Image (cartoon, rainbow, N blue to C red):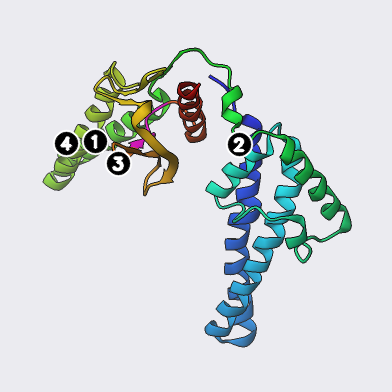
Amino acid sequence: MFKLKKIEKLILVGRIMVFYGSIFLFISLSILINLMLDNWVISILISFFGAIIYYLLSSTYWIVNSIEKVVNGHELIEHGLFYGVIIKVYKSDQLNLLFLTNELRDKWELVEKNLQNQPKEYYKNLEVGDRVVIYPNLKLIYFLVLIFLSISITGIYFGIHEKKNLLIFLGVFFLFFGFFFLNLKTNKNLKLILDNDGIMVDGEVKYLWAKISNEKLKILSKSICLNFDYNNKQTNLDLEFYNIKPFQLLILVKHFKSKQIH
């Protein structure tokens, strides 16, 4: 399977510096200003605008210094937009107020020229076979089995020892969850198969490339899913238990779809 390690590291740095940094700054400023002014409304308003300014400045700094470290800048931009590290792709004349130095402005002008020579459809150059199999993420499943079985055994033990039926009931309840995830581990059909025809999900449903459109990643409450239209009906494919990064799967889907056009 191909790797996205450099992009993933850059995105992680960006999320910490830009996204979480803005949240931390907002909370810290709110508390500090309120201690000085004793007015939460004014504190929150000042902190909010301060966090926005920080977000724009740090986001600009991050994209300018990160995009030159990857082979294709369009790929990094797509990741950055999805994870909220940047909010749009600016042009150099729109960023005059956001650059801290002339050096950064000159860097971005050079980046813009390089982006024009880089293919936006970067996934077409991906080198994979005609069939890709994605197996379950056994580390995650083993971890969940261990957690639920530990809670179950502890609950049953103390329930019997303390003669508390509620603890025994909760222990048995969590035991079912443990066996559920254990069953996932032994389920040989839990896998994704991508080939030139489409994508097979857990040996049950096959979605044909010709009928798939508008594929994109979507953040759900507990995980990230692959969202696409199939026969004009929206479909979500939950990626939580598969051993693949969300953008890896999205790139594979785009790659196989692009092969059908030629």
Q: CA distance from mark 2 to mark 1?
A: 36 Å
Q: Position of residue 90 (x, y in %)?
A: 68, 55
**Disc 3 on helix, strand or loop?**
loop
Tag 2 and tag 3, C-beta contact below 8 Å = no
Q: Earlier in the sequence, mark 1 or mark 4?
A: 1
Highlighted magenta segment, given as a residue range: 237-242
Circle 3: residue type: Asn
* Residues at circles 1 and 4 in contact by the CB criterion of under 8 Å: yes
Judged by depth in the image, the label closer to the viewer, 4 or 2, is 2
The residue under label 2 is 8
Residue underneath mark 1: 152
Residue 177, x across and y down, in percent: 23, 34
How many marks are shown on the rendered structure? Answer: 4
Name which residue type carries label 4. Answer: Val
Badge 4: few (under 14), some or many (20 or more) residues near its Cα, within 10 Å?
some
Whole-number angstrom distance, CA of label 1 to CA of label 3 = 44 Å
Label 4: state its secondary structure.
Answer: helix
Q: Position of residue 137 (x, y in %)?
A: 41, 25
The numbered dot on residue 232 is 3
